[in-house]
């Protein structure tokens, strides 16, 4: 699958993968911060943004293959740093486990290593069917938005909310259903975290209600080379809600990732 992507800056390659049901625009503040010293490649995952949205189950492994295909298409064979937020983190984790030779550093932001509970998976299927039947993403968006942001974001930076709603509104029913079904069948990765040898930054908003700090801490502790960054005044969209805290943590991490030999 040919993904739409942006490609800015020069230097060591960093690939950033967005959450559900968003698109690459959520990483704009990171692109601005990294591009002076990195090549930052930010795709729209299948079913999102400007990428195609086939009727299919978008397994996390499949989305990871899309990213590998994008890198191959760009002629990038050397190992890169890959970061993902939430669903993007599930994809980044799949990439690191399936293609360890392509990764020299990993950033897992506001994400989980566990699988869905049977109840959560069933709820995703219900939502996928409703969205496909009605074509209306309104109930999904209204249900998600209150849980995405920290209370401090709603109070102090309410202007951050409308662009996220707008990104969600641009996602198609087929894209939403494909991603929901793919997330519902993702495997539990907790017992494989020990295989990831490269440095990993695990970042989480202090108020993340979807993938809470305790889960992030457990992921960091299970990794051979994991470090945790808890981002203040942020919920589930930590890089977007508080780039002033997230970006320095990311840049510090990138400085410490050994260069490609
Ligand atoms: C996301 O932000 O990508 C979603 O919350 C992930 C999920 O629903 O598991």
Image (cartoon, helix red, strand yellow):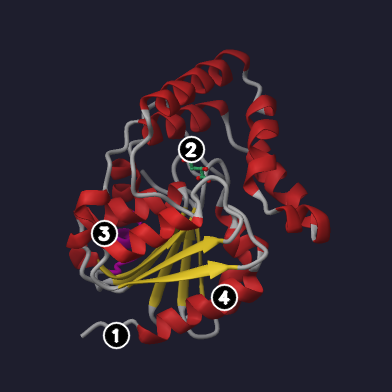
Q: State the separation of the CA atoms marked 2 and 3.
A: 22 Å
Residue at 63 percent of width and 37 percent of height: 144
Q: Dot 1: few (<14), some (14–19), or many (≥20) neighbours within 10 Å?
A: few
Q: Are marks 1 and 4 in contact (CB under 8 Å)?
A: no
Residue furthest front as drawn: 214
Provide the secondary structure element on which disc 2 rests: loop
Q: Is 125 positioned to the left or the right of 57 in the image?
A: right
Q: Is 22 positioned to the left or the right of 108 in the image?
A: right
Residue tagged 1: 259
| Residue range (magenta) | 70-76
Provide the secondary structure element on which disc 3 rests: helix
Provide the secondary structure element on which disc 4 rests: helix
Relative to the observer, which residue lies in front, 116 or 10? 116
Residue tagged 3: 96
Q: Earlier in the sequence, mark 2 or mark 4?
A: 2
Is residue 9 at least partly visible in the picture? no
Q: State the separation of the CA atoms marked 1 and 2.
A: 33 Å
Q: Is residue 192 magenta?
A: no
Residue tagged 4: 247
Q: State the separation of the CA atoms marked 1 and 4.
A: 20 Å
Residue 47 image label? 2
Q: Vertically, is 87 above or below 68?
A: above
Q: Vertically, is 16 above or below 173?
A: below
């Amino acid at each position: 699958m040919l993904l739409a992507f942006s490609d800015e800056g020069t230097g060591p390659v960093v690939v950033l993968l967005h959450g559900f049901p968003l698109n690459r625009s959520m990483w704009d503040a990171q692109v601005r911060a990294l591009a002076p010293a990195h090549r930052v490649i930010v795709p729209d995952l299948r079913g999102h943004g400007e990428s195609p949205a086939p009727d299919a189950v978008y397994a996390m492994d499949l989305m990871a293959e899309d990213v590998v295909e994008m890198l191959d298409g760009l002629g990038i064979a050397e190992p890169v740093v890959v970061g993902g937020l939430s669903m993007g983190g599930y994809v980044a984790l799949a990439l690191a486990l399936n293609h360890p030779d392509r990764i020299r550093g990993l950033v897992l932001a506001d994400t989980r290593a566990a699988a869905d509970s049977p109840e959560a998976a069933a709820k995703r299927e219900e939502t996928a069917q409703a969205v496909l039947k009605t074509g209306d993403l309104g109930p999904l968006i209204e249900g998600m938005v209150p849980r995405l942001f920290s209370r401090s974001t709603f109070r102090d930076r309410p202007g951050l909310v409308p662009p996220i709603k707008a990104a969600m509104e641009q996602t198609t029913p087929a894209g939403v259903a494909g991603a929901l079904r793919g997330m519902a069948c993702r495997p539990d990765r907790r017992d494989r975290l020990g295989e990831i040898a490269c440095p990993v930054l695990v970042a989480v908003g202090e108020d993340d209600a979807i993938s809470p700090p305790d889960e992030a801490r457990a992921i960091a502790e299970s990794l051979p080379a994991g470090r945790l960054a808890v981002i203040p005044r942020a919920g589930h969209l930590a890089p977007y809600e508080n780039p002033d805290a997230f970006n320095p943590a990311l840049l510090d991490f990138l400085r410490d990732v050994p260069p490609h030999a």
